[in-house]
Image (cartoon, rainbow, N blue to C red):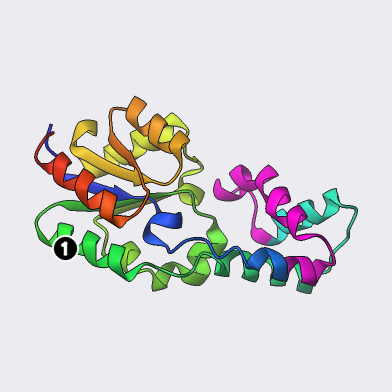
Amino acid sequence: MKAKALVLDYGNVISESHDETCYGRMAALAGLSEGFFREGFWRYRPAYDRGELRGVELWARVLADAGVSADRALLEALVREDVGSWRRVSDAVTRWALDIQAAGFRLGILSNMPVDFLEVYGHTVELFKRADFALFSCELGLVKPESAIYRACVERSGFMPGEIVFFDDMEANVRSAREAGIDAYRWVGLDRARVDWDAAIRGE
């Protein structure tokens, strides 16, 4: 089945690689180890991406796990560091996706995305503004790799699952998308994505 739509994840796909120097700055702010911040966040990530928690609530819980009670200023500083570490967008990926859209294909976004990022940086991401459809986990109350979020993507696109080409940097998300019938690929860089896309539009 030939591709009719390109759907992209945001983190490490549309965005440049995650700026992991944020963990050192967060550690300095809170007086905790960098490793603590690298690991602690993931306990609450699904609820954060689902829109059940805001950033200040998430970081209050993370710090509470270490027995630290934080004031609002510290929590807000941690949120700024966290969301800011994802703000850099790949110009090359943006141009590639817009070229595909200009060639007549539909362009979509499917991302695990917290409210805090959308509020601060969402308006700065060109592909968010130009996409034909965009699904963000915090707005749906669903997260990848849950099957329901892929069904929502298919419905929003207006195409059959096999007509959608989806790129994500997480293997679990790719696997779940494939189980939903979507033509999904692990993102390892733009050069490989160009090859995978060209094969998809040829129906290979």
Q: Which residue is mark 1?
A: 99
- Asked whether 204 or 131 is in front, the reply is 204
Classify residue 112 as left or right of residue 185. right
Classify residue 101 as left or right of residue 46. left
The residues colored magenta run 26-55
Q: Is residue 108 above or below residue 96?
A: above
Magenta segment: does it hold 35? yes
Give how far across and how far down residue 139 sits, in percent.
47, 50
Classify residue 154 as left or right of residue 174. left
Q: Residue at 47% of width from left, 32% of height from top?
A: 146
* Quadrant of the rendering where the N terminus is positioned: top left
Q: Is residue 29 above or below residue 102?
A: below
Asked if residue 136 shows in the view, the reply is yes
Q: Amino acid at mark 1?
A: Asp
Q: Residue at 23% of width from left, 54% of height from top?
A: 107
Give how far across and how far down residue 120 sits, in percent.
52, 71
